[in-house]
Amino acid sequence: MPRPGRLNLITDVPGLKVGCVEDEAVRTGVTVLLCPDAWAAAVDVRGGGPAVRETDTLRPENSFSRAHAICLSGGSVFGLGAADGAAIALSARDVGVKLAAGSPAIPIVPAASLHDLGNGGDKAWGLSPPYRELGMKAVEAAATDFPLGAFGAGRGAMAGVVKGGLGSASLDLGDGLIVGALVAANPVGSVYMPDGETFWAWPFEIDGEFGGRRPGAMATAVEPMPDDTKLGAMGRLRPGANTTLAIVATTADLSTAEAQRMAMMAHDGMGRAIRPAHTTFDGDIVFALASGATTLGEGPARAAGLARLGSAAADCLARAIARAVYEARAA
């Protein structure tokens, strides 16, 4: 049976590193995922209020639908500046596309940001938001092990009316196929069942990774928008005020179009872990990366392998969302 990788993190996919940094005064942060080289990449946006950068670059019909890094941040539109810092730091390492002799390396760093501007931190940054510098620091901090909970892009996040955060999970499918997920969970929907203790993602939990809570008596009907009165009072019922930012990655030799299918299927993980998801108030997005280290084969076997990867990515993402909130609340 599939099991989590050694770390139960997205970095169980060999080659990936993740850097997380925070600004405690601002109550925000940045997470950068680094690839050892430009990996096949894709993206699928389902939320109604995304804040994104370079997502069109990853469309399969374009000339370089690959990524050297992906940047997630708080700060809404201001947080997209973190990708500038990450790109500068990577170029200084000579990482990126070379178009002419003597020209600087051009890293492809797609990015997405969540809205954490109303969390009480000091946002009086004038003409100097902190995100560019945080992006550079996140590149320097990148490692295979990293913290979960209120760290990195999840520092200022909320999940409905409780603390959100950064989460990750992995699955080793055998024969060299590994799938991992990384998420910054800031949804308007709830990650909890009506009892307020059991995660919607509980059927997918492995080894008590987010507390081992199981549901008791089930309600015959559940309000479609839980805690809507509290959400409105918190100012979260506004388009773009919430989002779940995710990355899924695999060792498989996927094309950009196949990676996009994996990203599309991975969105099911949000539906399994958050209720409701993909609302007009969220900017839900999934990036997908593939290292190409393990072949899926050809013909019908390849199609079946891709379906299995997409299903595993959705399971990993559901678990990562629950882990994000579990670790943030535990802290």
Image (cartoon, rainbow, N blue to C red):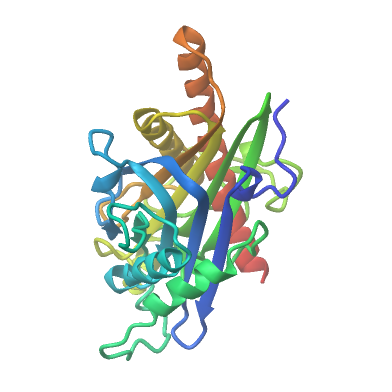
Q: Position of residue 30 (x, y in %)?
A: 46, 69
Q: Visible in this render: residue 36?
A: yes
Q: Using residue 49 as the reference point, say whether residue 131 is left or right of it.
A: right
- Position of the N terminus by quadrant: top right
Q: Residue at x 60, y 65 (%)?
A: 149
Can residue 196 be seen here? The reply is no
* Residue 45 or residue 42, whichever sits in front: 42
- Please tell me whether residue 305 is drawn above or below residue 330 in the rendered image: above
Note whether 226 is above or below 12 in the view shown. Answer: below
Residue 328 position, x and y percent, is 60, 66
**Residue 130 to residue 218: above or below:** below
What x and y, as percent, mark residue 224? Answer: 37, 46
Residue found at x 58% / y 69%: 141
Which one is nearer the viewer's eye here, 63 or 156?
63
Q: Quadrant of residue 236?
A: bottom left
Compare residues 45 and 325 and report the one nearer the observer.
45
Q: Is residue 132 left or right of residue 166?
A: left
Task: Please provide percent x and percent y for residue 91.
Answer: 41, 64
